[in-house]
Image (tube, grey):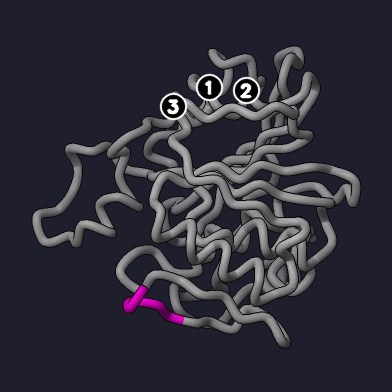
Amino acid sequence: MKDVKYEQISDGVKIAQDSRGLLLTTDACLLSAFVNRNAKQTVCELGAGSGIISAMLLLSKKIKSSVCVDFQPDICALAEENAKRNGLSDRMTVVCADVNVYDSDKRFDTVVSNPPYFKAEDGKKNESEQDRLTRHETTAAITDFAKCASRILKDGGNAYFCYTPQRLSELLCALSSSGLEPKTLVTVYPTMKHKPSLVLVSAKKGAQGGIVCERPLFIYKDKAGGEYTDDYLRIKKENRWSLK
């Protein structure tokens, strides 16, 4: 692929990404940190793109193995390159498939997903085709991601999603109606003066109702793009959820 950008995410770790689509974002870093550590857990990443979240989870030894699922063949090729480049090929498998039909012979302990945030009709006229495929629900809506997550999870398994706050009600309804009961909600703000920019939700398959709203996370101290908060720096460095 000619439009490849390489980004250093930690010492000795470099990730290949498609420069025409979404690059490494705060969303991916926070979702990776949000996943509970369990060195024995098997993970499936839905809408995995170039496999950045799976790579971060594996490299920080939070999980045992991961299967990355995406419907774009060229992006799947990047995920395979990232697995090979970082010595993860034996623990990170890439499957080119649509979440509407994807299933697995084995059931996973955990599902993670950073799905498209926008409806198909909300696209901007000047967006590239790659942007449209990555950011918008061109082939699968949030309900389809939730159904797929439920289908491939073990009973009692956990699902972790990050999503846009504007569609939080749709995410919670999609999870609950698919048998994934929302258990934890975190709202992320650029600063204390801004509206929220991200929500992180964990859900458990087959669980009883009841959700805990955790303390919000603020990314910057004073102004967006300025100095990071201590909470964010700690989360990013340790790749675990830690608010003080």
Look at the image and give the residue range highlighted in magenta: 1-5
* Residue 29 seen in render: yes
Label the magenta part by its dominant secondary structure.
Answer: loop
Left or right of 92 on screen, residue 26: left
- Local SS, label 1: helix
- Residue 4 painted magenta: yes
- Crowd band around label 2 with a 10 angstrom C-alpha radius: few (<14), some (14–19), many (20+): many
Q: Is residue 60 above or below residue 227?
A: above
Q: Is residue 192 above or below residue 120?
A: below
**Residue 63, horizontal then vertical, whole percent:** 81, 52
Determine the residue positioned at 67% across, 34% down. 159
Q: Amino acid at mark 3?
A: Asn
The C terminus, quarter of image: bottom right
Q: Amino acid at mark 1?
A: Lys
**Residue 8, horizontal then vertical, whole percent:** 59, 84
Query: Residue at label 1?
Result: 147
Q: Is residue 30 above or below residue 117?
A: below
Query: Residue at label 2?
Result: 150
User: In the image as oriented, which residue stretches furthest toward the left?
Assistant: 125
Query: Residue at label 3?
Result: 100
Determine the residue positioned at 39% across, 45% down. 116
Q: Amino acid at mark 2?
A: Ser
- Local SS, label 3: loop
Q: Is residue 78 above or below residue 105?
A: below
The one nearer the camera, 210 or 107, is 107
* Residue 169 seen in render: no
- Circles 2 and 1, Cβ within 8 Å, touching? The answer is yes
- Circles 3 and 2, Cβ within 8 Å, touching? The answer is no
